[in-house]
Amino acid sequence: MAKKIILSLVLLLLTTMLYAYDRLNPPYPRTASYSLGQNVWPTYSIGTRLLKLARYDMAYIYGSVDDNGTIKAKKLRQLNPDQILIAMGLNGIFFSDPPEYYLYRSYRGNLLEDVLPGQRAIRVDNTDGINLDFGDDYRLCYAVINNDIINIYDVIGDTLFAPSGGDDFWKVNQKHVRGDSVLSPLRMSGPGIFPNFSQWCPPVNGKYLWDYLAEKNLLEKIDWTEQLWDGLFHDAFYANVYLKSQTMDMNLNGIDDYVEMGSTPDKAGQYSINPHRREYIAKWLDRENVLMDQLDPNAANMLGVNNGGTCEYFYEQMNGHTYEGFGRWADWFYLKDDCLAWMEENKKRNRPSMMFIEDYIPEKWVENGKDRFDKMLYGLTTALLFDCYYGMTFGDWYYIMFWYDEFETNLGYGIGLPFELPNGLWARYFDKGVAISNPTGQIQTVSPADLDGRTYYRLRGGQNPELNNGEQFIAPIEVYAHTYGTKDVRGGGIILFTEPVTAVTDIIIDNFYNNDTSPGNNPVELQGDWSRYVTRGDLDWDANNPYWSQFGNKQVVGGFDDAYGYHAIENGGGEATAVWRPSIGVPGYYEIAEWHGWHGDYQSSFGEATDVPFQIIIDQHIRLTGTIDQTAHYGQWNILGNFYCPKGQDNYVKITNKANGWVIADAVRFRFLGDVAEPDTIPPEPPDNLKIWE
């Protein structure tokens, strides 16, 4: 045991000397998020989404100028100068790109008669395979005739039906003659049109596909000369394609490549689909690396992709990749082997890592998903084992970001590689603690004797206080896992620290359970005829309604109907109430503050109340009353007072609509100040008409 302790101290000293802090190499845990689901801005207000995004060590945002990527990046850089900013670039071909670059199905048709511009019915000699696997859903079905791109919305017998009206881009726009060839591009919902990464893809105007895509990203769609970006990222990246029900035809000979070539190399390594495609994808990535270095030679210029699951390729070109939806596309043990390879490759090349586990709560768990702390710990501890960034989101399309107590801790840097314990748990030592993950599919136990002899403590946290009770690690701890089926193995994890650590992240009680109420808590409790609202957005930040909301575009998916910003009601006699009731996991002093935007699209749309009455109730006793002026102090935390809050749910803030204008119910924050503090029950403006209850 003494040898273990001495070795750990030596490793700790070496690690500390090796890793001086820099923003491209932050301590662990490392947090990241890619900002999907808010591409409706500026149609709707962006709310406070960027405030949430700015707290991550690494943020992925749509970098295209078409998505106002430069504007968002400048704002994030202002909010957090140390943040690693990754621009999400184009990863596919679109209908505005040359059709010669498209990857086509093996379908081949020929016109049975001439077709005129705007003609709706197109007769062909066969339709077999043009809409393969679409059934009656033709939204992804297109035809290309002499580079004329036509949307096909129905197929009946030997006839394809195209739009015919007005200026529709997808109608027949040229005259085509009998016998002309009809092709069908391989279009899917995620990657768009598959590019034809192969030797058979012809150049257009002297430019090959791989150069065209790289230059479109970095010379047209993303302004790399702004010196905002640390790296480039491609979503829906297909290093391999395994299309169960589609066909593809790289060499345009009318034969399905899966039949002609197969998806794995033959004995001579010739013309199999995936190795052949990867050879030409590498040309694209190489070109992007060159362009980034030319445009901003002083930047990190990292490159990463989302391959869904693992990605055992392009080690020379990339800094890593994303696991989309932890456990969604990659088994834990495949992930382990893949991560270990990337850890070695990045170390060998002395470059920062972009390995990232983007976890998610499926929509089927809409009512309790964010509070499944075992699920979060399984993903987070796995990320810690393997040098990955980590983020937890809600929804099958990753709409909303969640923030946990563990994210605000500091383990320092990893000591050595992860290792397996005899019972199948995996662990890794850090300067300031240890991370333990359970991928076994059944509950396992970790004991002090299993580790290196250092003294460890549980985290003291507010969201999951039964596990994170702050106690010294002297008795065995059960680490959750359960097997529900061969494809549904769930796990858990725990982080232990070498010194006592308290991390109580701000408790936010907002309007909706997922958007944007803290884990372990429920949203505002409303009585009365309150209505929920979302307002228009603007490219001018100051013109956006700054309500406390991550997601506000009225999207409704399954049980998810949280896509609004705030609640409001007209003034009345006090019959309408709103109560913000946190779950206090760590008793102590808390600063209580209120947040509101304005009501309507503009500050002048409605007359908000200047005298919204509030009460602060602590342990079921009224401790403070007053009023809030909601015509001022928009988009900021307005402090109501500091109070000692005991553990539980008997502490809350209450307002009513007994006021002189519209009353807004938005967000209330409970910020932990510590175990000992001088309570300040005399708040600053805007609250007035105060009465302090002893």
Image: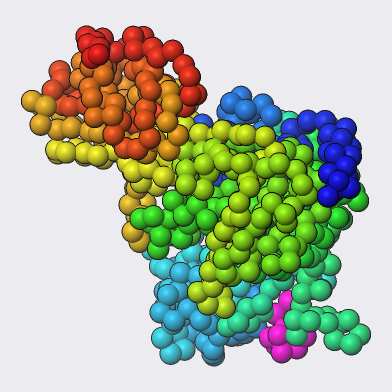
Mark count:
0
Q: Which residues are magenta?
A: 249-261
Quadrant (top left, top right, bottom left, bottom right) of the C terminus = top left
Q: Main secondary structure of the magenta part?
A: loop
Q: Position of residue 429 (x, y in %)?
A: 76, 48
For this rendering, which residue is in front, 300 or 42? 300
Residue 201, compared with residue 229, is above or below; it is below
Can residue 657 be seen here? The reply is: yes
- Residue at the image position 43 percent from the left and 23 percent from the top: 589
Q: Is residue 352 left or right of residue 379?
A: right
Residue 359, compared with residue 531, is above or below; it is below
Can residue 58 be seen here? The reply is: no
Q: Position of residue 206 (x, y in %)?
A: 82, 58
On whether residue 507 falls in the magenta region, the answer is no
Q: Is residue 425 left or right of residue 270?
A: left
For this rendering, which residue is in front, 154 or 68? 68
For this rendering, which residue is in front, 29 or 529? 29
- Residue at the image position 78 percent from the left and 70 percent from the top: 277
